[in-house]
Image (spheres, rainbow, N blue to C red):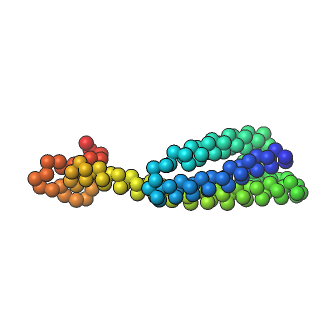
Amino acid sequence: MDETIKILREQAILCAHLPDLFDELIKILQNNSPDVQEPIKKIEDTLRNLNKNEQKAEDFLKRVNAASFAEYLSAQEKNIQRDVAEKLLKKTSDAQFKIKNQTDQLKLLLKKGKDYVAFNLNILARTSASDTYGAAAQTGSQRTRRIFEANI
């Protein structure tokens, strides 16, 4: 049970740290700041450590023949260590739910940024719309395709 608590505690700490890092990255992206390298490096380091922890967890669960920590904990007798492990598991689950919401928000911000860049590149290249994007190409235009058209 001590090994279970150790794995779950490490996982809970790492998962609790990620939302703060994602919040930092979201603020930077919302402010259109170019300083994204440092928060991304921190996120990558944390995810790397979380991946190592996940490997330890998988090895442990294989060793005890359980599909998940919840299944393993339900098979254990009720005591203080089981309660601690269940609280850590719940804390990890809550943090993972928050992380999922933040990644959805980050995906939306990145999509908006990508669309903004594509729009401005098309303006700079003086490309006109094509049938691919729903608008007819301008007559007399030298270019009939957009810069990012898939059929080029």
**Rendered image quadrant of residue 78:** bottom right
Quadrant of the image containing the C terminus: top left
* Residue 54 placement (x, y as % from top left): 68, 44
* Residue 62 placement (x, y as % from top left): 74, 41
Front-lying residue, 47 or 83: 47
Write the residue at 89% across / 57% down. 79
Front-lying residue, 27 or 144: 27
**Rendered image quadrant of residue 49:** top right
* Residue 144 placement (x, y as % from top left): 18, 49
Is any atom of residue 149 visible in this view?
no
* Residue 103 placement (x, y as % from top left): 54, 55
Front-lying residue, 63 or 36: 36
Q: Is residue 117 left or right of residue 86?
A: left
Q: Is residue 19 left or right of residue 6?
A: left
Write the residue at 25% across / 50% down. 124
Write the residue at 55% across / 46% down. 38
Write the residue at 63% across / 45% down. 46
